[in-house]
Amino acid sequence: MTEETDKLAEHIRHLKDEHHTEEMPHPGKTGYSIAINILTDLLGCVLIGLGLGVLFQRVFDTTHLVTAVFTILGGIAGLWTVIRYAIALDKQEDNNNEPNASI
């Protein structure tokens, strides 16, 4: 390699090392942001289920029971999403607390 490419490679290595050692806050790690994520996931699924129920009711001229079923299914989907999110956060926390996790 030439002298220029060696300097450039060294500069890149230096920037990478500097980037990895800086303490930067990770988005989504605060309790408030976790609560907002869970709330929006849960409410979003319920509202999507409700919207689909109302849509089916108007398009296919069905009873209110279909709307209720879709709303309940949306709630179940929201709870499932929240459970998966909590499991992923727990696994991530376990990985961060292990010794030599950064190696």
Image (cartoon, rainbow, N blue to C red):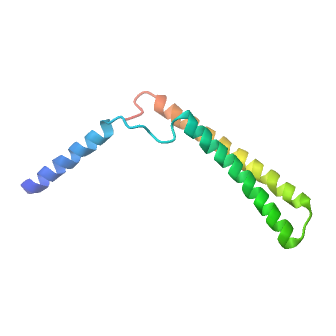
Q: Is residue 70 above or below residue 34?
A: below
Q: At which x and y percent is residue 95?
A: 49, 34
Q: Is residue 33 left or right of residue 59?
A: left
Q: Is residue 51 above or below residue 29?
A: below
Q: Is residue 60 above or below residue 42?
A: below
Quadrant in which residue 14 is drawn: top left
Residue at the location (58% across, 35% down)? Answer: 90
Front residue of 39/4: it is: 39
Residue at the location (13% across, 55% down)? Answer: 5
Q: Is residue 44 above or below residue 100?
A: below
Q: At which x and y percent is residue 100?
A: 40, 30
Q: At which x and y percent is residue 44?
A: 69, 52
Classify the position of the N terminus by image quarter: bottom left
Q: Is residue 19 left or right of residue 5?
A: right
Classify the position of the C terminus by image quarter: top left
Q: Is residue 99 left or right of residue 36?
A: left
- Total marks in image: 0
- Outermost residue on the bottom side: it is 59
Front residue of 82/59: it is: 59
Residue at the location (73% across, 57% down)? Answer: 48
Q: At which x and y percent is residue 102?
A: 39, 35
Residue at the location (12% across, 50% down)? Answer: 7
Front residue of 14/68: it is: 68
Front residue of 20/2: it is: 20
